[in-house]
Image: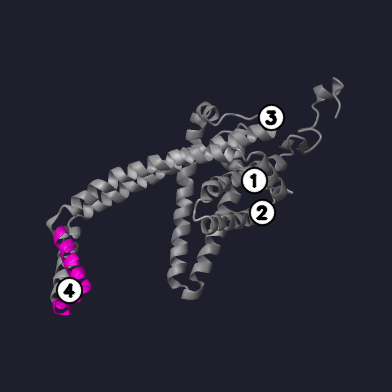
Amino acid sequence: MKFKHTFQVFIDNFATTYKLLLYKLIVTLVTVGLCCAIILPILSNITGTAEYISLRDSVIALWNSFINLETNLLHDKLTACRSALDTFLTMLGTKTGTFVLCAVLLLVVYLINRFLSGIGTYTTGSLINDRMALRTNSAFIYTMTKNLGKASLFSVIYVPVCFAYDLVCALICFGIFTISPLLIKIFALAVLLIVFSALKNTFVCDWLPSIIHGKMTNGQAISYAISRTGKKTAHIFSNLLIIQVIIVALNMAAFLLTFGAGLLITLPASYIILNCFQFVNYYDGNAIRYFLDENTIVGPERDRPLTREEFFRGEEE
C-alpha cells in the first residue's frame, strides 16, 4: 500500500511541484553565477596568453588551407599547429596551482548548491507533512523562513553524509566501468546508480519525517533512521527501487519526447515523490493517521492507545 499511497499523496501535493521548481531555478541561477565568477577570469587569463593566440591562429590557418584545398601547405600548417599545441600545453602545466584552486572553489560551489537544495527538501517535507497531517496549504516562503534554522542544520549534516556516500558510489561505478566489457558498461552503470540511490534512500527514509513530524533532534532522527528493527527494510528497498526506476523513466521520456522541456516538471516532481514516500512510510510505520486527499483518511482508528487518565475520563476508542 505504501507504493499506492505515495502517488496518491503526490497527486494531492502536486501544486508543491511548481513551488519547488521556482526555488530550484533560483538556486540554479545562483550556482551558475558563482561558477561563472570562478571560471571566466581563469579562461580570460588563458585566452589572453601568447601561447593560446598562437594556437588559435595556427588552427585557423590550417582550417583555411583545408577548406581552400591548398594541399601543398597542409603539411607545414599541421606541423605549426602541433608545435603551437605543445607550447600551449606546456604553458597550461605552469598553471597547475590555478586549476587546483578552481577545482576547490567549484567543489565549494557544488556543496553550497547541495546545501540550498537541502533547505528546499526540508521545506517541501514540511509542506507535505502539513498537508498529510492537518490538511493545510502552507506557503513555501513562510514555511522556509519559519524553519530556516532547523532546515539549515539538517542540510549541514545531510549534505556531507550524502556527498561521502555518493563519492564512494561514484568510485565503485568508475571502477566497474573501466574493467567491464564494453557491451555491458552502460547497462551496469545504470543499474548500479539506481540500486545505490534506492539503498541510500532506504537508510535515510525516516530521517526527515522524524525531525518534522516526530520533533526529534538530528541525532535522534539519524539513530532512528539507521535502526532497522521492525521496519521491513527489504520491503522499503523494493518500493524505492521501483520508484527510482519510474523516476528515471519519466525523466528520460521527458528529455527525449519534449526536447528537455518536460524536465522542468519531472525533475522537481521526482524529489517530491521521494519526499511523499518518506512521509507515507513514516506515518504507516508509526501507525499515524493521515490524509490521502480531501475525503480520504488512512491509518488506525486512533494514533495511539488510550492512557489511564483518558480511560477513566470515559473517552471512547
Residue at the spot x=36%, y=48% of the render?
107
Q: Quadrant of the C terminus?
A: top right
Left or right: residue 279 versus residue 163 is: right
Residue 139 vs 71, above or below: the answer is above
Judged from the image, the secondary structure of the residue bearing numbered disc 2 is helix
- The residue tagged 4 is 78
Residue 8 vs 214, above or below: the answer is below
Residue 315 on image: x %, y %: 85, 23
C-alpha span from label 3 to label 2? 26 Å
Residue 25 on image: x %, y %: 46, 41
Residue 153 vs 146, above or below: the answer is below
Q: Which residues are magenta?
A: 53-75
- The residue tagged 3 is 134
Marker disc for residue 277: 1
Mark 1 and mark 4 lie on one chain; the one further toward the N terminus is 4
C-alpha span from label 4 to label 3? 72 Å
C-alpha span from label 1 to label 4? 60 Å
Mark 2 and mark 1 lie on one chain; the one further toward the N terminus is 2
Mark 4 surroundings: few (<14), some (14-19) or many (≥20) residues within 10 A: some
Tell whether label 1 touches label 2 (CB within 8 Å). yes
Pick the front one: 286 or 137: 137
Which is more foreground, mark 3 or mark 2?
3
- The residue tagged 2 is 239
